[in-house]
Each structure stands twice: as C-alpha cells, then as structure tokens.
C-alpha cells in the first residue's frame, strides 16, 4: 500500500483547532496516514510536542507552521506553509509575535462590526475560548452563534434549524466576515515576501497553501519571483480540475507539490477530514525533503 501524507493540519495550538497533538497522531494512524505536518496558524508550539509524540504512533513528523501574510497587489490573505522550520529561530518568532498583535486588533474590530450589524457578541466567551491567544474568526463566530440572545434573530434561522445547521461557521464567515460581508474587516499582517524570508531564515521550505486564494495567475507569478518553493496543489479547497492546473503550473515553474487537508476538527470544518484528499502520496514529501536537504546541505 502506498504511504499517504497530510501536510496541512491544525491542532489545538491553533486557536481554531480542536484536537490535541496526541489526538491528531492517533487519528492519522487510524486514517492510514504515514507522515503529517501540524501547521498551526502563526504558531510553532506544536513542534516539540509532536516531535516527541508522533514516533509513539509510528508517524513521521514534519515540523511546520502556517504563516498568515498579505499580498500587496490586492490585499488578499496568502497563507505560507513552512516545512522543517526551526521553532527556536528568533527572526521567525518575532514575526509570529507581530502577526499575533495584528490579529488582536482585527478581532476587536470584527466584534465591534458584528455588534454594529445588530448581533449580540459574547466578548467574554470569545476571549475565554482564545485562552490568551488572539481570537480567530472561529471563536468570534461561536461568540455570536452560541449567544442565546441571537437565537430569535431571523437572519440566523437557517443556522439553528435549517440548511446551514451542519456547517455553521463556514456559512457565517462567507455571509458576514468575508469580503463584501456586512462585518468585513480588512486583514492586516506581514507581507508575503517577509513571510517567505522568515521561513527561509528559520531553515524552512516555503509552500503556498491552497493557491486558489491567489485570484490571478499573475499573483502566483509574483510569488514565484518572491521565492515560493512549492504549491499545495492537492487541497480540499480545489476541484479535480484545479488540482491538475496547479500541478501543471508547479511543473512548468520547477516548484514542489504538496498535499494537505487543512484539517481543524469536527466543528470548525466538519466536512474536512484528516487525510481527506486524493493524490496525497509519500513521493511528494520525498521531493520536499530532497529540496530541504539541498537548501540546508543536510
């Protein structure tokens, strides 16, 4: 049987991740996944934990992080996966602290925007869920949907009793927090080039997560010029046609191909399963490892 990988997973070290590192390793084993990268949002805290736990499950662990960046060309969020980063690198840690500070500001602005839109936001519950971290959109949405004062809001009828009940958070995000939503707040972070630089400074391999978020091919071209090493072509965000498109693009531009589910857990993304992708074969990781060894001369 061909070994399988999942190189885009979020643990409870991500503010919107739901499972512990131990639970993720156990689930990976159950799902027949041989190698994983836990790539928490702007956090490397999972790395030493997974380094110790993964071998107990005979799972290969790839140290990882997902760095949230902004593409100056259109202001869009672009998430950069960093594989094999050194979690103690001072330049990387400083950048992650800076991103966290941006996230706190954005969370406060989002809660105010939702309140201005007429929703009751349980801010205390949001900060408690964040547990000392910058609240993500997931906690803020839970602070709305879990607030009993909003139960009779006609805008939320479908979220509690109708077609959106089984996938509340993605629907709410698209309708209210995404661009053109009533409570949309422009995201702020370090730019793509700085994100790439800090990943490389930490010895990592920078790969663009779910490249469908780059709205034009010229934006992909620009990020290749900046130094992206690969594309997460195999992604739960992509149709089969898009997977083939990004694989072809990667081949034409001498880029690595990665595969990741963007697993968060059963509440945040209930339809996304760990390892729930096709074409996530181990040979993709072998090429990433070859690149890493050449880049670091290991």
Image (cartoon, helix red, strand yellow):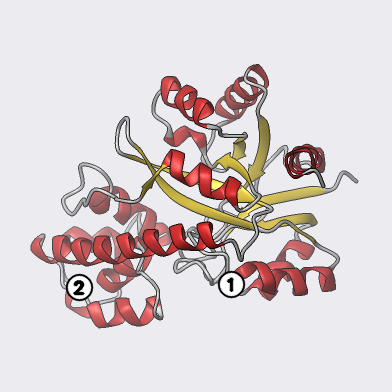
Residue 78, compared with residue 164, is above or below; it is above
Indicate left or right for 124 with 293 as reference: left
Query: Residue, x 62% and y 34% (percent of image)?
Result: 230
Query: Residue, x 76% and y 74% (percent of image)?
Result: 52
Query: Residue, x 52% and y 42% (percent of image)?
Result: 196
Using the rendered image of the protein, determine whether residue 73 is visible from the camera's viewpoint. yes
Q: Position of residue 263 (x, y in %)?
A: 57, 57
Of 53 and 290, nearer the camera is 290
Which element type, helix, strand or loop, lies under badge 1? loop
Q: Position of residue 139 (x, y in %)?
A: 35, 69
Residue 199, compared with residue 41, is above or below; it is above
Residue 257, compared with residue 266, is above or below; it is above
Query: Residue, x 68% and y 71% (percent of image)?
Result: 48
Q: Residue furthest right?
A: 1
Residue 110, picture quadrant: bottom left
Tag 1 residue: 19
């Amino acid at each position: 049987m061909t070994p399988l990988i999942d190189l885009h997973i979020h643990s409870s070290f991500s503010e919107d991740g739901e499972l512990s590192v131990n639970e993720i390793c156990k689930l990976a084993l159950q799902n027949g996944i041989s190698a994983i990268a836990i790539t928490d949002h702007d956090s490397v805290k999972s790395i030493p934990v997974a380094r110790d736990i993964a071998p107990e499950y005979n799972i290969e662990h790839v140290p990882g992080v997902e760095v949230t960046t902004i593409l100056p060309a259109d202001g869009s969020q672009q998430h950069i996966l960093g594989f094999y980063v050194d979690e103690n690198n001072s330049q990387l840690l400083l950048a992650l602290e800076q991103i966290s500070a941006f996230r706190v500001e954005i969370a406060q602005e989002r809660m105010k925007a939702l309140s201005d839109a007429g929703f009751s936001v349980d801010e205390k519950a949001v900060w408690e869920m964040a547990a000392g971290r910058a609240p993500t959109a997931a906690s803020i949405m839970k602070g709305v949907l879990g607030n009993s004062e909003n139960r009779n809001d006609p805008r939320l009828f479908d979220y509690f009793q109708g077609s959106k009940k089984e996938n509340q958070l993605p629907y709410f995000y698209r309708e209210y927090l995404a661009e053109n939503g009533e409570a949309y707040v422009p995201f702020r972070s370090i730019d793509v080039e700085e994100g790439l630089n800090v990943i490389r400074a930490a010895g990592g391999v920078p790969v663009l997560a779910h490249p469908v978020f780059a709205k034009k091919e010229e934006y992909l071209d620009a990020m290749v010029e900046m130094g992206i090493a690969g594309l997460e072509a195999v992604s739960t965000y992509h149709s089969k046609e898009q997977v083939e498109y990004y694989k072809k693009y990667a081949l034409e531009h001498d880029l690595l191909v990665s595969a990741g589910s963007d697993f968060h857990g059963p509440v945040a993304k209930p339809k996304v399963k760990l390892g729930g992708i096709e074409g996530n074969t181990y040979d993709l990781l072998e090429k990433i490892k070859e690149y890493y060894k050449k880049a670091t001369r290991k």
